[in-house]
Amino acid sequence: MSSSKLTLVAPATGIVTLLSDVPDPVFAGGTLGEGIALDPLEPVLHAPCDGEVVQCAKTRHALTLKTEQGVEVLIHLGLDTVELQGQGIELNVAVGQRVKTGEPLCCFDPELLAERARSLITPLVVTDDAGWRLRLEANATGGYVERGAALMSLTPAAASDTATTERTGPWQERRVTLALEAGLHARPAARVRAIVKRHDAEVRLGHGDAEARGDSVSALMNLGLAEGSEVVLHARGEDTQAVLAAIAELLTTPEGAEPQQEATMPASVAEGEFAGLVASPGLAIGPLVTLSLPLPAVPYDGRGEAVEREDLRAALERVGRFLENAREQAERQGQRAEADIFEAHLAWLDDPGLLESATARIEAGRSAGQAWREALDDEAEQLRATGNALLAGRVADLRDLQRHVMAEFAEAGAAPLPDVPEGAILVADDLSPSQFVDLAERGPAGLCLKAGGTTSHVAILARARGIPCLVAMGEALEDVSGEHAVLDAHAGRLEPAPDEARLAAVREALRRDAERREVERAEAFEPAVTRDGREIEVAANIGDSSEARLAAESGADGVGLMRSEFLFLGRDTAPDEAEQCHEYQTSLTALGGKPVIIRTLDIGADKQLPYLRLPEVPNPALGVRGVRLWHDQPALLDTQLHALLGVVPLDALRIMVPMVSEVGELAWVRERLEAIAVERGLTERPRLGAMVEVPSAALCAANLAEQADFLSIGTNDLTQYALAMDREDPRLAARADVLHPGVLRLIQATVEGAAGRCPVGVCGAAAGDPLAASLLVAMGVDELSVEPARVAAIKASIRRLDAASLARELPDLLAMPDAASVRRRLAEIHESVSDATTTTPERIPS
């Protein structure tokens, strides 16, 4: 057999059927791979190629051959034959045996199988093509074939089509436990791919017997990884250690969980009403408008392989530019959820697996538009077949890409969205994220989707925009209509024809809700003063200047933490002074003179930079990071301090030094800051503060406060170090609680040590936790810094707080045995004033 071509022949005389016509969605949808099917007319199946038997089902209905080229071929006798438990089937081979083309693999009783199985149609599927390209032969177009007739051929992929550049050197391995609550879905998979593309390394991820290339979002998602899955990372190349560290950090750092709704249908709905899953809570009244969103029409047949390949490349490039512009616009407008989704779409657009699938169809004679349609149809079926609700919810994202690219080949261009009246409740099969964004600009009152899931990107966007949305409502929604429908996305039901009493009750509830939101928005810009008269500054945590405007618009009293390391990540060289200064100045300008705290570079052995080589250490959390890095890399510090001192006005700037463990470290940074300020002839100085993240800093807070202009407690790391619990270990996440009495005593020591010397803030996750935030204020903290979206809520909770009263509970709370006890007691205290603090959506009588 030629090494440049592998031919698969008919395993029996029979009738050929296209795989897409097999009456089984797993095979027809291409979930297992590409191939062909045969309805055998003789009772023996023979080897379609030379190879080794690598798998035999215990029920004898399926076996897999592996060729010397690494191609794996599944021969599956009949449909639903697994239920026969081997009856009527005898194997002629065993695992490990080598066979030649035409040798018998198994015998079967055709009458028994015909009577008890759903069908004798036998799929022949290439489950692993080992990088070879598959093409159907002329005999595979349908009809009668003799045993041994050529059905499929495979040839090596061209070098230019190989998406992963081969690196040399030994493979290195790292094992991690996935901490992503929703599993390895589109966005984290896109981030893995982005990490790989930034590094000179070849990466593969393994789970059990499955493996995926690190640069393929599709392959990564199809691993079906869930929280707690054990993942083996393999890498080789120049940046092996850096890429392993970066991916390990991503996979073992819990995501900010999206608000998840209870994925259950209402217990019952009245006659004429429709139930759905709550994707975004809320209440709406409006006319029902059904959307019809067909795919653009594209030519089916191609005009030649070379022409269609180039057309597809150009179309993907144009769509990529559009998505990149959309992502940048979303970032400028502070719409981070939308920006993340567009970024995931960009990664999918450049996915080598999808490109290879489409290219194979072009080679089979399809047009570029049709090839892309079929490739994404197959991918969508694979996502559905995983059984993972989150991955299945990403089908709408694939449909979005499908529509975008197909529109490039449609004679009439992209099918425009239909006109919809403002205030309508829209009904559709499903929506892609870009369709949702377009429709959201038209002011819909709500959404009702036949398909979709509570974890889909459309659900995320609906929650971010505050648009009530029900999903998974089913085909019963097909002919629904109503002029004044009620969408109750608290109770999970759509009422197409409510009576006047119901409409009046809902309208009154909407009026009160609008008034409440308006008051909250207005009050977001007012000081947060407790009931006993203490004013607390509520600032925002940001990652870059694009979030600074969002912080200002949220009513934040300033920026409590700007993480400057985002400027240094994802690039080949460190940002220069001018670039840094521009970023810092943009943030200060956006806040209009309010204080902005910028943390100096917090990087270390756990977060490698490609241009900053640090040695691997057994415990990166205890290694060279934060302020410790500056003694090894003083030039980086000097450049950053020069950039910071270039902003105006300097009296609005606060510089914060991370990972300070003793006062001498802060004094050293102040000396460098003063020397640069004198060198530049500056008369003003920014305030300099320290983060309290390690127990020694908390216990020596009085000394630090003599040197610092302010202290800010990083509760995430302080909790980690105090409890000796790795914050990145998902098995310990629930126990690593800031409300542990030991951590609270360190916070108390910090506040008491700084009293009368300098203010104390909190910029860790605890500041946004309602229970923890109230206790922090009662303990004497002066400032809380939270995500911009939390500013208004935290300010409102502070206004309801009697800090002095809660402070009297502090001795009892500190004496409790564990964090769970503290949480229970705080919850009881909050419950006692629930009438003032509740944020539960009002239930409207039906």
Image: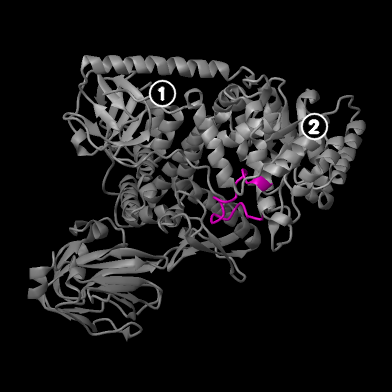
Instruction: Kindly identify which numbered label has been placed on residue 755.
Output: 2
- Residue 451: % across, % down: 29, 40
The amino acid sitting under disc 2 is Ala
Please tell me whether residue 275 is drawn above or below residue 119 in the rendered image. Answer: above
Picture quadrant of residue 568: top right
Tell me where the magenta segment starts and ends, as one range. 724-742
Please tell me whether residue 468 is drawn above or below residue 227 in the rendered image. Answer: above
Check disc 1 and report its element: helix, strand or loop: loop
Pick whichever, 29 or 280, lies toward us: 280
Q: Magenta stretch containing residue 734, yes or no?
A: yes
Picture quadrant of residue 77: bottom left
Residue 604 lies left or right of residue 284; in this view the side is right
Q: Real-space Cα distance between discs 1 and 2?
A: 50 Å
Residue at 44% x, 28% y: name it: 465
Check disc 2 and report its element: helix, strand or loop: loop
Q: Earlier in the sequence, mark 1 or mark 2?
A: 1
Disc 1: which residue: 441
Pick whichever, 238 or 317, lies toward us: 238
